[in-house]
Image (cartoon, rainbow, N blue to C red):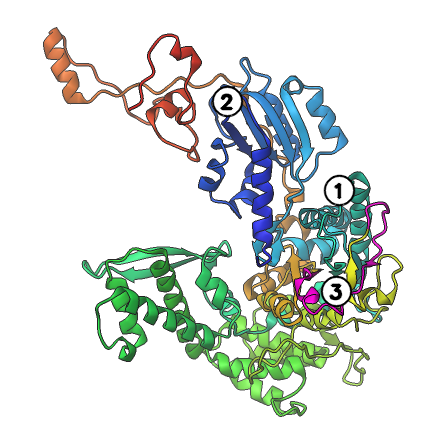
């Protein structure tokens, strides 16, 4: 079965829910604003309810008392959340009959003492860490959904936040390893000639990560828990400064172009319009781009031309399988789309084909309208330092100027071109910088954004024309992954180059040292290496019996896992690189960062690197949230039953009394119905809070049970 970080994460949640057996069979799941995001990222609520969960409730919201039911809490250990837990059991009666507490990340000693010295202590049946403090976005990709990492690590006003952020990040990386049962060797990027203040970030993060991982291994005898014959894994800690060109580049895989050119909300929601075949009305539809969309999974890393062809072929096949139309093969793409949408067939595949047909068509239109082919050719010359013919680009500035003057080239693309030119030249004198920005019609804000590149290690302004370009030994700019290059796809992201050298055991030990002394032979024959025994805190590979004589043994050996973490954000081209290397070398490359970097986010965060601290809107600078006071209040009474006015008149005429009126204004009592994530909406559940099939013992004494 193909590896999937998403499936492993999902399975861990299911295992937790299934392991908790309660007296009423059904339990409530209580989450907070943070943990609900983690769970919603991988699981629809309906899947959770299948594991004997009656409803999912938010701890910060109003909830009804369910004293006859036990609850599983999956929470973040923030002070106000702990106060919410204590409030649930400081009431009479308590909110739930018992509590199983799981904290993401783990609860510290002070928080644990706070819980166990409170009224909640008598109801707590478990208080344990749940190491799932990250978001698996794709099968091989994870993030923290934190868009503040660049200013936190590189803005000088945020110096006091660096160490706490490193500790938090290291513990999140331990969560990734713990989920997969891997105890990897750790290496980090150590530039030989550093050019920026934050060059020690990979070392600092790798050191704390090693310490936290060793402590976890000492505390958990069952760790590591991978297969005996799985090769030793390793973990590379890099830094955004290793490749500043890539975030500015236009990439031409389907996924990268979609996030560059289209508006995709929350990273996976794309809104588009379709026309109803009967009414001709325009309707807005929201499509989800995730692992459940098999078309997206199959095509997202292909070049856009191949992706468009793939969508077209799937539409042809779908139309042939579900239509009586003839001569479909001769129909145009738009005709096929109209035929498909007019079908009275309501399937998930039809919706997905409609989504990707719209997306690829829109991308194609924007590609032609915004002169991306011309822009990309200049970008490739600037990024690689070579023309398509392999010669130095001597006229690149003359070729770039017409694009900077072209009204069809957006201001964002002009900024990207100028930035790549500055990286290509390793900086220019102040006068040339101003002339270049004036030509590109850049604002003062754009100019400041470009100047901030020096904080990431790339000089922008030279003192004079005579200043020599500093010598930098470059890592080989190629990768053995079988992907074909074109005129506008020649640049290879440095992440891919590093990965390619890592799997071949050719990474320079000075540029990428280990956190602990390791033999260079540790990667020499990865198929014969296994994880370290749990008897020692230092991961040392050991050799098993040789398997070279068994032709099938190599192919039956689980793939070696290579983890990569890049502080500051990852691009979609780097995501694609992880899959390319995995497939080319039979590895499982797992790539992570705090967040994705599409060009808009990258430019926005660059601008924040010299912004005053009070304008950054960082979570650490916001007032600490407080527990809602209503959690200590009694439950609201049930809503007044509203009688139909005609029924009132009929009843009044029988009694000889004038009809009464029930107010339905906004001041009426709020509904006490279950949370919207309830497993059902039947009357019994609404009135009693019991799950379907559950029979209230108290009521059984008074009435006979009837099944409608």
Q: Is residue 32 above or below residue 302?
A: above
Sequence order check: which comes first, mark 2 or mark 3? 2
Sequence order check: which comes first, mark 3 or mark 1? 1
Q: Which of the image's four quarters has the C terminus? A: top left
**Mark count:** 3
Residue located at (75% from left, 48% from top) = 224
Residue linked to disc 3: 527
Q: Observer-nearest residue: 171 or 351?
A: 351
Q: Secondary structure at mark 3?
A: helix
Residue 34 shows in the view: no
Query: Which residues are the magenta region?
Result: 533-561
Residue linked to disc 1: 222
Residue linked to disc 2: 24
Q: Are marks 2 and 3 in contact (CB under 8 Å)?
A: no
Q: Observer-nearest residue: 155 or 169?
A: 169
Q: Residue 102: x, y in percent? A: 64, 33
Q: Residue 501: x, y in percent? A: 74, 72
């Amino acid at each position: 079965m193909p590896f999937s970080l998403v499936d492993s994460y999902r399975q861990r949640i299911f295992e937790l829910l299934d392991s908790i057996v309660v007296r009423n069979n059904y339990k409530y799941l209580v989450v907070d604003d943070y943990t609900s995001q983690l769970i919603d990222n991988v699981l629809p609520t309906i899947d959770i309810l299948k594991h004997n969960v009656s409803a999912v409730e938010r701890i910060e919201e109003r909830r009804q008392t369910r004293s006859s039911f036990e609850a599983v809490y999956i929470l973040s250990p923030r002070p106000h959340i702990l106060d919410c837990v204590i409030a649930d059991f400081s009431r009479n009666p308590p909110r739930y009959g018992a509590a199983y507490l799981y904290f993401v990340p783990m609860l510290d000693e002070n928080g644990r003492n706070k819980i166990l010295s409170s009224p909640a202590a008598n109801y707590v049946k478990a208080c344990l860490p749940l190491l799932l403090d990250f978001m698996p976005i794709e099968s091989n990709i994870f993030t923290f959904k934190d868009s503040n990492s660049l200013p936190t690590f590189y803005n000088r006003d945020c110096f006091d936040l660096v160490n706490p952020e490193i500790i938090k990040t290291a513990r999140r990386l331990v969560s990734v390893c713990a989920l997969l049962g891997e105890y990897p060797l750790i290496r980090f990027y150590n530039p030989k000639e550093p050019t920026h203040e934050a060059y020690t970030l990979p070392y600092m993060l790798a050191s704390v990560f090693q310490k936290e991982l060793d402590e976890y291994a000492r505390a958990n005898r069952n760790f590591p828990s991978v297969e005996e014959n799985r090769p030793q894994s390793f973990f590379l800690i890099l830094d955004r400064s290793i490749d500043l060109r890539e975030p500015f580049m236009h990439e031409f895989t389907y996924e990268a172009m979609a996030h560059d050119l289209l508006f995709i909300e929350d990273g996976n929601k794309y809104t588009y319009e379709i026309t109803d075949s009967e009414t001709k009305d325009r309707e807005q539809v929201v499509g989800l781009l995730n692992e459940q969309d098999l078309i997206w999974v199959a095509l997202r890393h292909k070049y856009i031309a191949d992706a468009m062809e793939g969508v077209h072929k799937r539409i042809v096949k779908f139309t042939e399988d579900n239509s009586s139309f003839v001569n479909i093969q001769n129909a145009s793409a738009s005709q096929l789309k109209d035929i498909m949408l007019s079908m009275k067939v309501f399937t998930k595949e039809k919706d997905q084909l409609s989504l990707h047909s719209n997306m690829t068509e829109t991308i194609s239109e924007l590609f032609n309208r915004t002169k991306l082919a011309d822009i990309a050719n200049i970008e490739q010359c600037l990024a690689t330092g070579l023309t398509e013919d392999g010669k130095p680009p001597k006229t690149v500035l003359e070729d770039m100027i017409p694009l900077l003057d072209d009204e069809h080239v957006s201001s964002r693309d002009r900024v990207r071109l100028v930035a790549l030119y500055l990286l290509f030249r390793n900086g220019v004198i102040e006068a040339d910088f101003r002339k270049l920005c004036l030509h590109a019609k850049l604002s003062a804000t754009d100019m400041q954004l470009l100047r901030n590149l020096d904080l990431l290690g790339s000089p922008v302004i030279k003192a004079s024309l005579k200043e020599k370009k500093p010598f930098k030994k470059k890592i080989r700019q190629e990768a053995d992954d079988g992907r074909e290059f074109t005129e506008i796809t020649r640049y290879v992201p440095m992440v891919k180059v590093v990965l390619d050298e890592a799997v071949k055991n050719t990474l320079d030990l000075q540029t990428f040292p280990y956190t602990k002394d390791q033999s260079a032979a540790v990667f020499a024959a990865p198929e014969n290496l296994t994880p370290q025994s749990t008897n020692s805190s230092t991961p040392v590979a050991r050799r098993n019996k040789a398997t070279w004589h068994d032709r099938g043994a190599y192919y039956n050996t689980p793939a070696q896992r290579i983890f990569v973490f890049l502080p500051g954000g990852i691009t979609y081209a780097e995501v694609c690189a992880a899959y390319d290397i995995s497939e080319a070398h039979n590895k499982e490359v797992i790539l992570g960062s705090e967040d994705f970097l599409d060009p808009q986010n990258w430019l926005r965060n660059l601008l924040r690197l010299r912004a005053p601290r009070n304008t950054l809107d960082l979570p650490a600078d916001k007032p600490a949230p407080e527990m809602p006071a209503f959690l200590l209040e009694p439950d609201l009474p049930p809503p007044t039953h509203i009688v139909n006015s005609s029924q009132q008149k009929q009843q009044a005429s029988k009694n000889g009394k004038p009809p009464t009126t029930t107010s339905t204004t906004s001041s009426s009592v709020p509904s006490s119905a279950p949370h919207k994530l309830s497993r059902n909406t039947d009357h019994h559940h609404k009135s009693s809070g019991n799950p379907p099939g559950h029979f209230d013992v108290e009521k059984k004494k008074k009435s006979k049970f009837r099944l409608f």
